[in-house]
Amino acid sequence: MIKSVYSLPMISAVALTLFLIFSPQMGKSESPGIITLPSGEKVCDLNGEWNALFEHFGTCMNAGSWKAIVKVKQEGNRFVGTKLSGGNPVTIGKEVIRGELDQKGYKKGEIYMPNWRWWADCKGKIADSCKKIIMDEGSCVQVTLERK
């Protein structure tokens, strides 16, 4: 009789523990740097602070290169990067990059061109297990972001 009284709470405790360990965790990533969207699509989680290097070339070579810290905020598959610090013509707190992701990684994006005060389309890629973003406008500037 005593054994049966203690066995029910013990079985319940073990079952609850196993349920909590092995149940799906909604809203958490399956692996570091990956999130699942409501559509079921898996994309990189870009939220956070990034070290950014803006390199100018071609007709923009005279603008030089500069470093900044960029805070990326992501909602679903869209992301926006805002300058937190750095020596460039963009005011702190302003957007410097934006784009979209898909299951293959980088889908499309734009870099803010402060000298012309407009956004330029750019190609890009995400590398190093979602820890590096390279955005290239093609004729003037390339931005490389690395997770802090």
Image: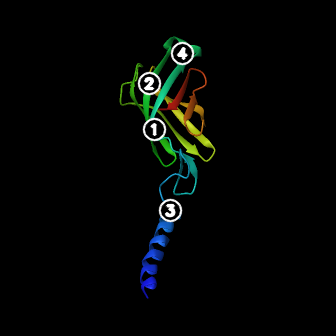
- Camera-side residue: 48 or 103? 48
**Residue 126 picture quarter:** top right
**How far from the left and from the top, in percent, is residue 69?**
43, 28
Label 1 secondary element: strand
Foreground: disc 3 or disc 4: 3
Q: Is residue 41 visible?
A: yes
Q: Quadrant of the N terminus?
A: bottom left
Q: Amino acid at mark 3?
A: Ile
Give the residue pinned by disc 3.
21
Whole-angstrom CA distance, mark 3 to mark 1, is 34 Å
Give the residue pinned by disc 4.
60
- Camera-side residue: 86 or 9? 9
Give the residue pinned by disc 2.
68
Q: Farthest residue toward the top?
A: 62
Whole-angstrom CA distance, mark 2 to mark 4, is 18 Å
Label 4 secondary element: helix
18 lies above or below 32: below
Residue sitting at 44 percent across and 23 percent down?
114
- CB contact under 8 Å: marks 3 and 1: no
**How far from the left and from the top, in percent, is residue 91?**
36, 25
Q: Amino acid at mark 4?
A: Cys
Residue sitting at 56 percent across and 39 percent down?
130
Whole-angstrom CA distance, mark 4 to mark 1, is 24 Å
Q: Earlier in the sequence, mark 2 or mark 4?
A: 4
Foreground: disc 3 or disc 1: 3
